[in-house]
Image: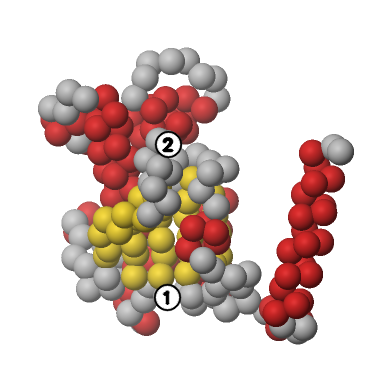
Amino acid sequence: MDEYKKLILANKAWVKDKLDVREDFFLRIADDQTPAFLWIGCSDSRVPAEDITGTEPGELFVHRNIANQIIHTDFNMLSVLQYAIEVLKVKHVIVCGHYGCGGIKNALSNKHLGLINKWLRNIKDVYRLHKRELEGINDQNTRHRRLVELNVEEQVWKLAETSFVQHAWHKEQRPILHGWVYDLHTGYINDLFMLTPDTRMDDIYRFEFDD
């Protein structure tokens, strides 16, 4: 059997399972969505957001890219963020990285990889910002894990630097920003830290609003 046909069969089995539990499962979610969470994660196929959080369709609004980056010139990510905050009114935004991330590993190297070099440059900037700490770690695996964590922390701060987040903080005291790391070897999420609407950031990044 062709591999793609297995996906279609699995879909039919999944639908049956949902309908066996609740006949109106799909009718309830078809007309609207009211997720409480925006998930910004890595594109890695081993990190399925809904599976590792035990969430159902309609509970997570999801954006994924290589190494879970928040890049202020990425209009795809910015459009997702604006929609999630201003239209869906999410209460939480989660940036979730993962140990063993290929994007992080390649950013630690000097390999020429073509177009993706431009994307990985952003991770190299994180390395430069934390160079003293990272180069004080001799074990390569430990250094990689630490860069995964530092990358997540930097991306959460970049979220806080956006006007979308700051305006929602100013007007509605939401959302809470979370930095998580998923462990491929254990299946557990490491809850690193969070930023709340009363977070004070460097003045250079702070917007002032009239309303």
Name the amino acid type tagged 2.
Cys
| Quarter of the image that includes the N terminus | top right
C-beta proximity under 8 Å, tags 1 and 2: no
Q: Which residue is mark 1?
A: 91
- Most foreground residue, 89 or 208: 89
Q: Residue at x 30, y 59 (%)?
A: 191
Q: Position of residue 36 (x, y in %)?
A: 48, 75
Q: Quadrant of the C terminus?
A: bottom left
Of circles 1 and 2, which is in front? 2
The image's mark for residue 118 is none
Left or right, 118 with reference to 183: right
Which amino acid lies under the numbered mark 1 shown in the image of this protein? Lys
Task: Name the residue beneath numbered marker 2.
Answer: 101
47, above or below 147, in the image: below
Classify residue 175 by image quadrant. bottom left
User: Which class describes the residues within 10 Å of circle 2: few (<14), some (14-19), or many (20+)?
Assistant: many
